[in-house]
Image: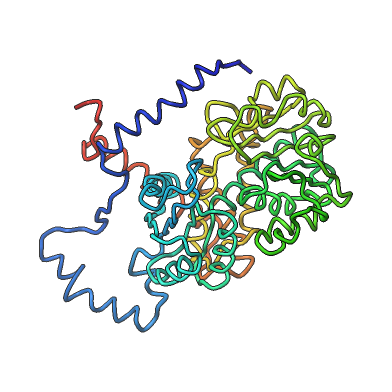
Amino acid sequence: MKKVTVEELLAKAEQPSKDAMRLHPFYRGKIEVIPKCRIRSFEDFAIWYTPGVASPCKAIQADLEKAYEMTNKWNFVAVISDGSRVLGLGDIGPEAGLPVMEGKALLYKYLGGVDAFPLCLGTKDPDEFIKTVKILQPTFGGVNLEDIAHPKCFRILDTLRKEMEIPVWHDDQQGTACVTAAGLINALKIVNKKAEDVKVALIGAGAANIAIARLIMLVGVRPENIIAVDSKGILHRDRGDKELLKTKYKEKWHLCEITNPKGIKGDIPEAMEGADVLISASKPGPGVIKPEWVKRMNTDSIVFAEANPVPEIWPWEAKEAGARIVATGRSDFPNQINNSLGFPGIFRGALDIRATKITDEMCIEAAKELARVAEDHGLHEDYIIPNMDQWEVFPREAVAVGSKGIEQGVARVEASPEERFKIAEKIIRRSREEVQLLMKEKFIIDPDAE
């Protein structure tokens, strides 16, 4: 693996920010609403609006499911945040979080053919947040929760999944976990180890790693083989702050109860001792994970250093220390663990069956399909997961998710896998070709050509 100087990395990392500050005001946002129905003359508005629109209104009133057939509800996802934990920026507020939510909506459309709409709420109160999302339910076919602070994000997700009739998803939890699980499935194949046998060190015990723990257990990792670490050290049942964990951080306390049965104490080095797998979703590095700690891991170790913009340890340092497979959250290193590989295809599949929820089992099927796509292209140490430009990922994920949803009884409509693949492929292809056409016809302007 080629070593890159810190100066080169910083220069490369700073360029997108410079371009963003130039192009965001140029376009004044990244998405817009455009018609998809024909408008031959002004007479057509009698169909799309009054008086003609009264007929579909009455039909929906008589049967609410017809909203999926006569409006865009079938393909509409709300991307909702309170701006309390945006990317690596923290609590910057809903207005400052809006560019991120717009970006998420753009990815939904281009990668999954999903019409996503950003909604940044002016409240930090979880009860108000929950109430607002529930009120919005008639308009949308699904909800993507985004960039919500821990621990309230858990209660918000759990409550809405339980009380709403459309799928609710928290990408910082479920999306990260899905793609990480996919990478782990293939990494284990390369090192010829079984999920039920490996010891896993989880560095960071926030929303991402708590969800990752849940999903990797579903693919076979045993809870007793997991040791998790938060900012105060290894999680165990005798922690001095256990009463606080029990009351305020229940999900973290649950990890204390089901993992680390030997009660190992200490910090990151002790958690990594003899581990086969390291999954770190903590703070940006480098230096959060030290090479000498990687040396204390098992033979053919796997290191996922997922912090952005700089991973907890440089990939070449982890390799030199003995790691056989290294993944990060960056696109300029091999094996990028990127949420964008997950949510567009997962929601495409959920929407196409009019799912009432996205279950953990549906996420696992998405992870397995992601792994299969990479395997079809030929696995090796620097390729354990597909790239975003391998667009067959998304319709294949959609089919896998939809099939599991049908099997679990959370689908409102059913179709064969072949039919659903054709539908997903057509919708996604249309979205991509539409963007290319708008650019070609200069409705989307190239600022560098002006």
Would you place residue 302 above or below residue 349 in this image? above
Camera-side residue: 224 or 189?
224
Point out residue 259 in the picture as x, y percentages from the top left corner. 80, 52
Relative to the observer, which residue lies in front, 338 or 130? 130
Q: Where is residue 46 in the image (x, y as percent from the top left)?
A: 15, 70
> Between 413 and 166, which is closer to the camera in this rendering?
166
Quarter assignment of residue 214: bottom right
User: Which residue of the protein is positioned furthest toward the right in this rendering?
Assistant: 262
Q: As displayed, is residue 84 above or below residue 197?
A: below
Taking 439 as reference, is 69 left or right? right
Give me the residue at 89% from left, 49% from top: 262
Q: In this view, does 76 lie to the left or right of 172?
A: left
Q: Where is residue 234 in the image (x, y as percent from the top left)?
A: 77, 45
Residue drawn 38% across the image and 65% down it: 73
Report the side of 237 relative to 211 (left or right): right
Q: How is this picture coloured?
A: rainbow
Is 394 rendered above or below residue 238?
above
* Residue at screen point 37% across, 56% down: 117
What is the residue that sits farthest to the left in this orientation?
Answer: 42
Q: Quadrant location of residue 30?
A: top left
Which residue is painted at 41% across and 72% down in the image?
Answer: 135
Q: In this view, does 277 lie above or below 428?
A: above
The C terminus - image quarter: top left
Could you tell me how many numbered marks the image carries? 0
The percent position of residue 31, horizontal first and vertical second, equals 31, 47
Q: Residue furthest bottom?
A: 62
Please identify the quadrant where the N terminus is shown. Answer: top right
